[in-house]
Amino acid sequence: MTHQLFPEIEPYASGHLQVSELHRIYWEESGNKNGKPVVILHGGPGAGSSPLMRRFHDPEHYRIIVLDQRGCGRSTPFAELEENTTWHLVEDLEKLRKFLGVDKWQVFGGSWGSTLALAYAQSHPEVVTEIILRGIFTVRRSEVQWFNQWGASELFPDEFELYKSFIPGDEQDDLVEAYHRRLTCDDEAVRLEAARRWTRWEAATLSVIPDPLRVEALVEPQIALAFARIECHYFRNQGFFERQEQLLEDVGRIRHIPAQIIQGRYDVVTPMRTAWELANRWPEAQFVVVEDAGHTMTEPGITQALLAATEAFK
């Protein structure tokens, strides 16, 4: 079993795909151009992809497809909220699959990427060979409230105070709505500070042992603005799902697809209850609980479990 990430590689092809009159999404391919296709879905929403995402699949075996979802990373227009919903992203994946000439592909996603992976697979199960999920998130109100209003605040009160204190007391009963007003206002300085505070809160809670360098990198203005604006937009709209429990209730559409659900026991961002509920509804999927891990894919136990999953599905 592989325990170390695969070596760094560069894409052999990349470009932008016009998915609407407004939006162009960045895509890239690396690894074996004739290999088993996998599409990797980044988190956030709004976080964008990173070179690290190419390193969880054997490049000798897999055709590794990475993209930046609407409005973030190298996709344009930057931080754009118009025409930016879960269902736009689902159809973007289909457009990209057809554009690249892929018949079927493995779907690999963590955090928000797990949300999008479930939504996509439930919409297009016939083109999905396997599903690998990490840090399960379904955008239910209880999940958003846990992280953005009360819950995670009890474990990280120091960091939460920095997030909460940006909002006046008379607006603190709905921090997502209050942040949305500031992230979409006309004052650039207010937008940037709101983005920095929002992003810092999440960055500070991603792992069991905080990583100051990761926090510093993620609050860089260009990264933070797209991340915060798009994420807050999705949270405020409950992921654009028709039903609170939609992704859990519709799991029957994908139970025939081989899958692994990987979850850190001490994940504060997307607590284990959601993964546990998904696994209970999907007994055919392999449920892997990493006992000493938080949320991020760079937690050693999470990395090991993800690599084991991609190797198992070769």
Image: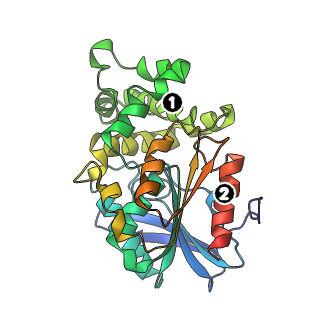
Residue at image mark 1: 201
* Residue located at (68% from left, 33% from top): 209
Q: Secondary structure at mark 2?
A: helix
Rate crowding at label 2 as few (under 14), some (14 to 19) or many (20 or more) other CA atoms within 10 Å: many
Q: Secondary structure at mark 1?
A: helix
Task: Tell me the kind of residue under disc 1.
Answer: Trp
Quadrant containing the N terminus in the rendered view: bottom right
Mark 2 or mark 1: whose residue is earlier in sequence:
1
Mark 2 → mark 1, Cα distance in angstroms: 26 Å
Displayed quadrant of residue 17: bottom left
- Residue 54, above or below 275: below
Residue at image mark 2: 305
* Residue located at (29% from left, 51% from top): 245
* Residue located at (50% from left, 38% from top): 269
Q: Nearer the viewer, mark 2 or mark 1?
A: 2
The colouring scheme, among rainbow, by chain, secondary structure or one colour, is rainbow
- Residue 187, above or below 235: above
Q: Position of residue 45 (x, y in %)?
A: 43, 49
Q: Is residue 23 visible?
A: no
Rate crowding at label 1 as few (under 14), some (14 to 19) or many (20 or more) other CA atoms within 10 Å: many
In-front residue for pair 277/57: 277
Of all residues, the one furthest to the left in this rendering is 242
Displayed quadrant of residue 124: bottom left
